[in-house]
Amino acid sequence: MREKKIQFTQALEERYLAYALSTITHRALPDVRDGLKPVHRRLLYAMSQLRLGSGTGFKKSARIVGDVIGKYHPHGDQSVYDALVRLAQEFSTRYLLINGQGNFGNIDGDNAAAMRYTEAKLTSISELMLQDIAEETVDFIKTYDGTESEPMVLPCAFPNLLANGSSGIAVGMATNIPPHNIGEISKALIKLLKNPNTTVSQLMTIIPGPDFPTGGEIIDSNSLIKEAYSKGKGSLRLRAKWHEESLGRGQYQIVITEIPYQVNKSRIIEKISELIDNKKINYLETIQDESAEDIRIVLLPKTRNIKANVIIEDICKVSDLETRFSINMNAINAKFEPKLFNLKEILNSFIGHRFEILKRRTNYRLAQTENRIEILKGFLIVYKNLEKIIKIIRTDNDPEKKLITAFKFTKRQVEAVLAMRLRQLKKLEEKDIKLEYQELVDYRKELNLILKSKIKQSSILNEEFNNILDKYNKSSYEGKRRTIINNDYKTVEYSIDESDSKEPVSIICSHNGWIKSIKGHQDDYSNVKYKDGDKSKFIIQCKNNDKLLLFSSLGKFYTLNCSKITTGRGFGEPVSVVVDKSDNEEVVELFVFNENENYLIASTSGKGFIVNTSDLIASTRSGKKIMNLKQGDKSISCNNASGNFIGVISGDKKSLKFLTYKLSEIPQMQKGRGITLQKFKVGKTCYAFTYEKNKGITFNSSNRKPIPFNDLKPWLGKRAQAGKIQPKNLLNRLLDK
């Protein structure tokens, strides 16, 4: 045996590529035609081979799993059982593919019982997906050990990919397709079949959005959902469904009846309970789980003065009562290649698959019909020449050869003639054969017409889709939409105030990003403790019902509720605990939110613009992106734009240049990169601020004299100029270093 030398990197690349392709095509991504991953397809096929139809009895899950791993899927039994369990869970799968008997887990996160204790069989929907598989409608391949055969894809008369969705992570790509309403999908298929030029926008009048098994409410605009469906990628906000129940005398409680998809109910309750115990939310008395088969989570407010929608708005920001569902519609196409599909492409792929199945089924039936017609022709020859044929069979040593020569029988015909029973030779049987022959001739014409006519094929598919629509109409349990889509939802502007008094507090934020709240306002904060190497950066005197706006170096604004910031004499907690700030984000500015105020924001690249505080409130912990930045760029300053002139300092440590001009040259924007404030060849923008012409530039420290406007005339210019060397230590004086 000769050894072949290859580069280690080459060998590694080849093997990793093989692994990656295997993971993508044979494990993590579903087929766009049947919406199944290999493990799910093998499960359904194995159960069909075990004759576990919807009308039969149940079989132990262990038996099913054993057949799957023994014949088709050479992986661990637990992974196969987990896949089986998921297809049988009403809170995981929108349209169940497996009917389970026993403990199959619950929405609280409890696991299913062991496979030896549970039983399963196929549902009627699974039978639809396996329909006509015996009629050579799909290709089969050898299993991993070559002893069995398995289908490469199921015929799938049910649009499973969109109906049930799919999720998975492969090497370098992932998929996360949400489930949808089958009635809406059927209507969209009918419309697209009739008019192939139908756009995504037109399809969305029928399919307005996902339909999750756990219900809930989608609170994103139609334009955002449309963008996700058009590109095949995006996200949407999904919120719990709730209502208010009166307790009499003005008292009420909030009852949550549906929670977002793939959210653990018990973890929601644990999280909110923890927040109540730690006094992070002071407006709730308690939370109770009164769920039985249906979800019923009860929130009891401390006072009737707070509106229920205000409480929900607030609590959604700190718990999974509101989540963001990422849409990533990656799937394997008919050529077994991974592809990002949009809504229309998925529907077209399913229609194309059904056309192919229809043609293959028709060809199979045509072949079977031709074979039977051939045999019946032979039988009719027998009845015309009965005595001669009987004589040949009785007397000739090789009757097969003699019959072929004498009567021009085919091989198949002569075999059928020789296998005929005597009772088939009676006169009545001849009439039946003639009748069957004529029926099959007519049927053959019909089959040929189907193969030749695209219109006929479309008509058959249209009937299929209409049958699904009729079966799963709005009045049926499966066809009723569960998820409400609220395209017009607007975030509630709220202020939770438990009492008439607004207590004064001081918010302390350090250079290293630790934040805390202390009661009252002080003249001296020198006794405030910080961690070693840390020091004060912001001290905000405000009220406990105030909201703070935090501007980060990544151009994001975060909203902080003063009542939720930890109190005490300790070091506090990282800002990243209060909001979802990343570790590489620095706190640029922190200030009290006041309505309709303007702020000037600037980046190190010399870009900037004016924003109004009404556009800065973030509805979630993840913040709101306001300033777009290029790679390597950072947001550097955020200052109140109450003046009528702007000052910008840019450059490097050796040469800092100052430029001042009218604030009216700076536009007001909701978000973006901004415009050039000051040009510079080296360095970066260090600071941008505004001031009043009649006051000049004032400083943080009272012992520093202001610079009157007249003294600033040498630096007066127009926007985007370079400016001149800054007045002595201007930047340090502004920052009070």
Image: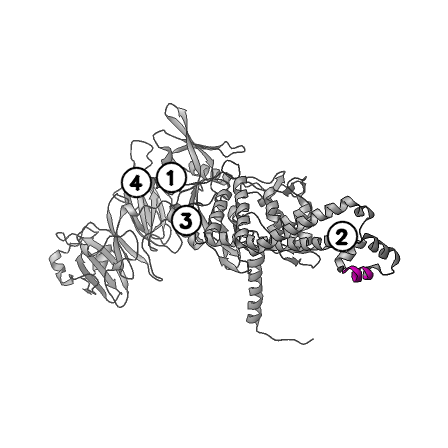
Amino acid type, label 4: Asp
Q: Residues within 10 Å of mark 3 (few under 14, many from 20)?
A: some
Sequence-wise, which precedes: disc 4 or disc 1? 1
Residue 737, given in percent of the width and then of the height, sits at: 25, 56
Q: Residues within 10 Å of mark 2 (few under 14, many from 20)?
A: many
Q: What's the distance in space between the residues labelled 4 and 1, CA to CA? A: 14 Å
Sequence-wise, which precedes: disc 3 or disc 1? 3
Q: Which residues are magenta?
A: 401-408
Amino acid type, label 1: Asp
Tell me the residue that label 3 is attached to: 202
Looking at the rendered structure, the secondary structure element under dot 2 is: helix
Q: What's the distance in space between the residues labelled 3 and 2, CA to CA? A: 57 Å
Looking at the rendered structure, the secondary structure element under dot 4 is: loop
The mark closer to the camera, 3 or 2, is 2
Residue 34, given in percent of the width and then of the height, sits at: 56, 51
Q: Are marks 4 and 2 in contact (CB under 8 Å)?
A: no
Residue at 24% across / 57% down in the picture? 688
Looking at the rendered structure, the secondary structure element under dot 1 is: helix
Tell me the residue that label 1 is attached to: 314
Outermost left residue: 710
Sequence-wise, which precedes: disc 4 or disc 2? 2
Asked whether, in this view, residue 460 is left or right of residue 427, the answer is left
Sequence-wise, which precedes: disc 4 or disc 3? 3
The mark closer to the camera, 4 or 2, is 2
Tell me the residue that label 2 is attached to: 379
Please identify the quadrant where the N terminus is shown: bottom right
Tell me the residue that label 4 is attached to: 546
Looking at the rendered structure, the secondary structure element under dot 3 is: helix
